[in-house]
Amino acid sequence: MSKSPKTTQMQIRVSANEKTSIQRAAARAGMDMSAYVLAQVLSVPAAQFRDRVRDCAESASPRLALAELNSLLSDLVAGELRAAITAPPPPGLSPFLGNYIAAMVEYACAQRAVAIPEWTRSIAPLTEPVYGSELQSLRLYLLTNSPAPFCARNIFIDATLGDRV
């Protein structure tokens, strides 16, 4: 999105309910309404984030798609990250994918001092632990070395945002 001075105005007609919805979404994102609408319409990172999450949801084996999402989140600077993650992932993700994506977003936010989006809090942690390896001998290592956002969601991995295995 361009940072040039704003010299013109645009008006749109919306219903009272639509305006209320936009106001609530903007408040959840920590933005004013104009900034929120512009971020939704003009944000390339937001479109890329939506595309990567969709790829995760549509993949029979989402490891590669999660790696692509990892690469995207790793490359975004704070402002781009903030714009990219305003909208939640689509409904219908498996509990594992929802938690993994939420943990990746929370980890990226912590690295860049960006407020964690409200939608991550609506994803309940997994009830059963998931380990990044089937090897029993690695479980203690994974339990003690997994990043906090992943541990909080009952996911125990070694590699995190920006890392490659």
Image (spheres, rainbow, N blue to C red):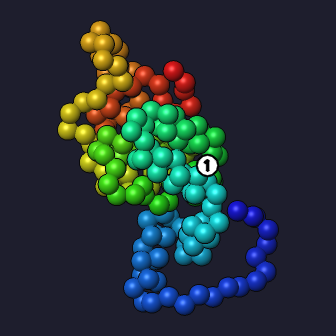
Q: Residue furthest left?
A: 127
Identify whether 149 is placed above or below 118: above
Q: Secondary structure at mark 1?
A: helix
> Residue shown at 49%/70% (left/top)?
26
Which percent across, then down, holds residue 89? Answer: 42, 55
Quarter the N terminus occupies: bottom right
> Residue shown at 43%/22% (left/top)?
158
**Snapshot quadrant of residue 129:** top left
Q: Amino acid at mark 1?
A: Ala
Identify whether 161 is placed above or below 4: above
> Residue shown at 79%/80% (left/top)?
7
**Snapshot quadrant of residue 100:** top left
The answer to whether 4 appears left or right of 118 in the picture is: right
| Residue topped by disc 1 | 78
- Residue 54 seen in render: yes
> Residue shown at 64%/40% (left/top)?
75
Which percent across, then down, holds residue 85? Answer: 51, 54
Which percent across, then down, holds residue 120? Answer: 38, 51
Task: Identify which residue, 156 or 109, lies in the foreground.
Answer: 156
